[in-house]
Amino acid sequence: MPEFKHQIEVEGLSTWFGKKKILKDITCHFKDNTVTAIMGPSGCGKSTLLRTLNRLNDLVPSFKRMGNVRFRGEDIYGVGSSVYDLRKHIGMVFQKPNPFPMSIRENITYGPKLHGTNDEDDLEKIVESSLRKAALWDEVKDELDHPAPNLSGGQQQRLCIARALSVNPPVILADEPVSALDPISAAKIEELIVELKKDYTIILVTHNVQQAFRVSDQSAFLYLGELVEFDETKRILEAPHDERTEAFITGRIG
Amino acid sequence: MSNKNELITADDETSDSDFISRLKRPFIDFNNADRSGRVDILGRLGLFIPAVASTLIIVLVLAFLWVESATIFGDPSGGIGIIINPTWDPNRDMYGIAVFIVGSLMCTGLAIGIAVPLGIGGAIFLSEFCPMRLRQPIKMIVEMMAAIPSIVYGLWAFLVLVPVVKNNIAPIFGSDSNGLSLLAGGIILAIMLLPTVVTISNDALQTVPRSLREASLALGATQSETSRKIVLSAALPGVGAAVVLSLGRAVGETMAVLMVTGNSLQIPYSLFDPTYVMTSIITNQLGYAFVFPLWRSALFAVGLILLIMSICFTLTAKLFIKWGMKTRGYI
Ligand SMILES: Nc1ncnc2c1ncn2[C@@H]1O[C@H](COP(=O)(O)OP(=O)(O)OP(=O)(O)O)[C@@H](O)[C@H]1O
Ligand SMILES: [Mg+2]
């Protein structure tokens, strides 16, 4: 096992979709047991950065990349590194809740079954613990066999978090996970993120400065594909070094 | 007097414009049907009539077949028992139709058994693995396959498929079949069903949102696991619809099957035995049977059973689709 300081380290990362350069020479790292917020105006490349970390952009034929991304010290784009292993260790929660059209239980057991857990008792335990961690257990414990798409939007999103937790990944990527939800559900999920920080490394894309302030420890501010600032959230929000950051925080851009 | 006259004309005028506005009313309502509080008679009738008509047609066809086949079902030499009686011999007034029912079921079963897995496989390939550039051309070719008349399929099968079954396939299994067989019928029927299964399943697969595929991949699933366990499962009701449509076509298909199954009055015991399906017996004998009430009626009874079978298949498949939609939370 190679030595590493942080779960995920990004070094000199540039990406393209076709000829269009999206990310420009990004270098940053994501500390263990912290929430890192990625902020920036729409279209600046937040999602692209996030999806480069679990190689989801590989699906886009025109995607090109230079520079390194290391997960636990190993280059994730290097020869011989398994994308499936990587994704097993880096969970993802999407902007819109996207539960599978199956029962709640099947949503949770899908991941573990893929990776070879077939024992009924083990699966049952995973279902309960994942749902508990996502603060959904009490609401759905009596209807585990009901179709997941019948849940409310907020419940669906917590189910998606539980589904991501089901394979116990050390890192969780979340791309604006509450922006499609009502304020109460959003608050619940924010709380949950803070709670989960104890055990997981969380990278949270957000549009919302207040949200970054409430839940994150460190922040990255992206502007037109450039990493403008990367530091403790408190410092960035209270005393931004760059005027573009300041403009974003005060709501003049974005 | 004059006063009264005036009144009448005035009255006439209002009732006249009333009449016109009453005539115009449905058209105005039709235009405004999207606004709240408007009931649009024209639109309702326009939808109601076809709905009633199509229901009525099914009922009328059933009634017509029932009336025509009543003779055989009422006759002592016939009766409801013809369904399980395998002897068809109009010369001796024996009208058992079990042979045809079994023939049709086996032929349809074989065709569905071949076409559905192949078609779904093809649809998955098209929607999940096929390079973008090839997708449209392949889809177009497949759709064109559906436009080929069944008699042309029949001719091709008679000249190519039957000899292949006779010379290349049957000998492997130690059969001396002449090629006109259940297998040939099943294969040609499967080929004819394939375009329906592929296109409709492919459409169903493509409506599965990309976000579901991404969610699965993000959990560490491979492309193949994702397409089998998530995409296909999510699209299953739509794929079921493809199977329903092809089932309907399979039991009702006539020409191609008639030309290659050998039309022999026996229950097939192997894939290489000839068989006789329900549509074939009607087509072959209706001309001779027309002046013999019992014979003719027996052929209509075959038609009636065929329609009932077809309706049962469709209803069963619909129930299955509904169940699939429920467990997936679509309805
Ligand atoms: N699959 C793709 N193919 C081509 N271009 C893409 C693709 N995905 C994103 N882009 C482009 O990359 C740029 C950055 O997009 P990205 O989704 O990363 O922005 P974002 O910061 O997440 O924005 P938002 O806050 O609106 O989600 C955009 O200009 C977008 O058009
Ligand atoms: Mg985004």
Image (cartoon, coloured by chain):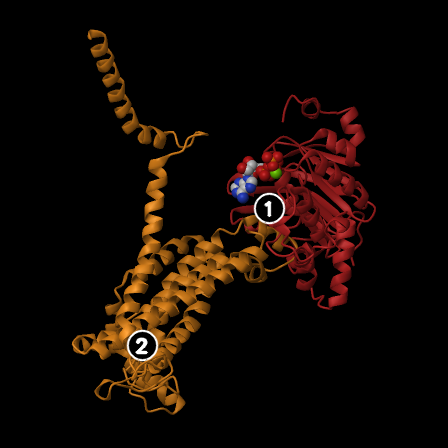
Residue picked out by circle 1: A65
In which quarter of the view is residue B199 placed?
bottom left
Q: Against B2, is B209 above or below? A: below
Q: How many marks?
A: 2
x and y percent of residue B263 in the render?
27, 82
Q: Position of residue B155 (x, y in %)?
A: 23, 73
Where on the picture, by quarter, is residue B217? Answer: bottom right
Q: Horizontal placement of B114 versus B262: left or right?
A: right
Numbered mark located on residue B73 in the image: 2
Badge 2 sits on which subunit? B
Residue A163: tell me if it is visible: yes
Tell me: is circle 1 under 8 Å from ligand 1. no
Three-letter residue code for mark 2: Phe
Q: Quadrant of the C terminus of chain A?
A: top right
C-alpha distance separating marks 1 and 2: 76 Å
Question: In this rendering, would A31 be left or right of B173?
Answer: right
Q: Which chain is orange?
A: B
Q: Residue at x 79, y 44 (%)?
A: A31
Identify the subunit bearing mark 1.
Answer: A
Task: Give the chain ID for the red colour.
Answer: A
Asked if one can make out residue A72 in the rendered structure from this viewpoint, the answer is no
Q: Residue shown at 71%/50% (left/top)?
A: A70
Name of the residue lying farthest toward the top: B2
Residue at image position (52%, 52%) is B208
Per the image, label 1 sits on a secondary structure element best described as: strand
